[in-house]
Amino acid sequence: RSSVMLATVSPLVAEGDQVIFFVSRLKNDMKLIELVAGETYQCKYGLFRHSDAIGSPYGCQLRSVDGRGFVYILRPTPELWTRSLLHRTEILYDSDISTIIMFLELKSGSVVVESGTGSGSLSVSIARTIAPLGHLYTYDFHLARVEAARADFELLQLQDVITCHQADANVDGFTLPTGVLADAVFLDLPSPWLAVVHAKTALKVNGCVCSFSPCVEQVQRFVESATTLGFEGFYTVEIRVRPYRVDTFTEDWKSVKLSASRKRARDGQPMASSAGSGLMHVASPETTMRGHSGFLTFARLSAPSPATVNPSPPLSS
């Protein structure tokens, strides 16, 4: 079977499909389920029969047996996978992931090396981008994490796009098939300056490398090491996302007594009024946001100078 992450499949839910039971994006309240006739899923919103979901269109509501609530039945995507996966390590989220994929210039057919695999959040997004012609070789030193990630990728039918290896990238480097070089290398390691020499060996000329590091001292040491190895065009960025909320009030919203917390949250101004509806829409930033995750440092492996590639023969006497 083709992976539901990659293929265009039926709009109807079928037995054996991997689906997302979705409640709330804001609370990351969702669950990846394999539908099996006769089985059930129970949560605080009630009891849900798999059989009731089979044959339904993706995106519909599934009501609980006892009528207490409902969930949405969604097709798995890398974005939903990131929000629903089991955290074996700290993971990367959509803002960092999208930046990595863009600046590494990934596309269908790209060959990518990743270290370390962790919980597989980035791996699945890379797989969708480079499929069906590309391949991801992902490495982690922790055997249990490698086996768990491999099982997840098989569950999502991504084993033809992702190959898992257990290795210490700082010591062992990257073992690629004979004749294969990577278009890009991603390093999520405590000491990326030790692995960048192996990244150079694995990369094509003009290939890109990205290092994710929580501390700026790690960035400094990575850049120093990569510079001596012929990398250039360094670019470091920190991604922070500030979400906004939109509240709807009646036209006399100024006279409405709001709680102190709502007053603190509402530091925006009215943006639009629905004509004739008597409603006012107010946009304001959320009082909390995801803080610092890490620094992304990008660089490109420069081509050797012509004098190095084709040295001139010595002049004859």
Image (spheres, rainbow, N blue to C red):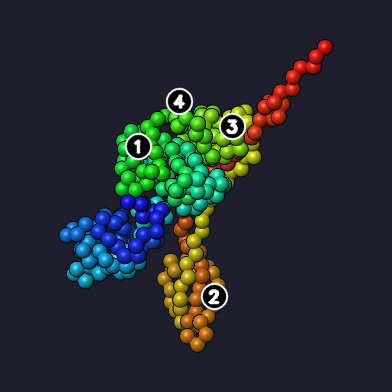
Q: Residue at x 47, y 82 (%)?
A: 279
181 or 256, which is in the foreground?
181
Q: Which residue is mark 2?
A: 270
Q: Is residue 148 visible?
A: yes
Amino acid beneath label 1 = Val
| Residue type, numbered disc 3 | Ala
Q: Residue furthest bottom?
A: 276
Name the residue carrying label 4: 171
What residue appears at the point 47 percent right and 44 percent down from the top-left corner?
134
Instruction: Give the CA separation, mark 3 to mark 1.
Output: 27 Å
Of labels 3 and 1, earlier in sequence is 1
Give the residue at x 58% y 29%. 225
Q: CA distance from mark 4 to mark 1?
A: 17 Å
In the depicted view, which residue is nearer to us: 247 or 125? 125
**In the rendered image of this protein, does residue 109 appear above or below residue 139?**
below
Tell me the CA gap for discs 3 and 4. Answer: 17 Å
Q: Residues within 10 Å of mark 3 (few under 14, many from 20)?
A: many
